[in-house]
Image: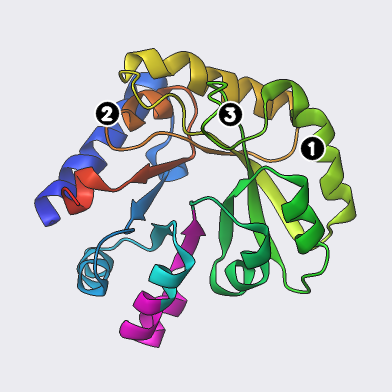
Amino acid sequence: MRTRLLAIRERIERACESAGHDPSEVTLIAVSKGFPADAVREVFDLGCRDFGENRLHEALSKFEALPQELVQACTWHFIGTLQSRKVPQVVEAFDVVHTLDRESQLVRFARVRQPVTGLIEVNTGREPQKGGVLPEDLPAFVQRFDELPLVRLAGLMTMGPAAASAEEMRPFFAMLRQLGKQCRIGSWLSMGMSDDFDVAIQEGATHVRVGTALFGSR
């Protein structure tokens, strides 16, 4: 695990150097979904403090298995599809929600009395099977957050087409960067995963979501 983490950090540094970015401005999110609590503990001991989970029940089980001081020392990112009915539990358990994309979610957030950091998921690839706000619908969706003072809208997130190569992903990452500038909501850009986070960083990613390259195959 240590070797894989060092390799990831080296890739981050090289990508930042090639684009003139500061590596300290890129947050590595260790995507621990599908891996046991012991794997989280091992990565934590190597210095990681940001973890991503996509299933509420799985995450809660890990929180119970891990020392509470470890859980509290980390920033937990919810990166899975967010069912509206689970909004209260997700807000209570997680620090950041990456997948805000539906009106029904916002109705639930209006009832929550706990602050949370949120990112709007954008369907940059216009894939019907994926969640996310379409680019042309983003400005109107952003305005809805004026009614949600406890949701700190920090920026945008995208997945991009699954079959695309790293270089083929570049236009989708660039699109998210441009949308972030146009909407003027926050500086966070959550984009890039194990196979393509180098390109994402070159296009302005502030948060990269890395699972397989760090933990191995599921």
Camera-nearest label, 2 or 1: 1
- The image quadrant of residue 120 is top right
Residue 70 forms part of the magenta stretch = yes
Quadrant housing the N terminus: bottom left
Q: Are marks 2 and 1 in contact (CB under 8 Å)?
A: no
Q: SS for tag 2?
A: helix
Which residue is at a point 76% across and 52% down the rendered structure image?
104
Q: Which residue is mark 1?
A: 141
Which residue is at a point 75% across and 32% down the rendered structure image?
184
Q: Which residue is mark 3?
A: 123
Span colored in magenta? 61-78
Q: Which residue is mark 2?
A: 14
Q: Residue 89: x and y, percent? A: 61, 73
- Closer to the chain start, of discs 2 and 1, is 2
- Closer to the chain start, of discs 2 and 3, is 2
User: Does 81 sit left or right of 73 as displayed?
Assistant: right
Disc 2 crowd rating (10 Å Cα; few below 14, some 14-19, many 20+) is: some
Residue 22 forms part of the magenta stretch = no
Q: Amino acid at mark 2?
A: Arg
Q: Residue 85: x and y, percent? A: 67, 65
Real-space Cα separation, disc 2 to disc 1, in angstroms:
35 Å
Q: Amino acid at mark 1?
A: Phe
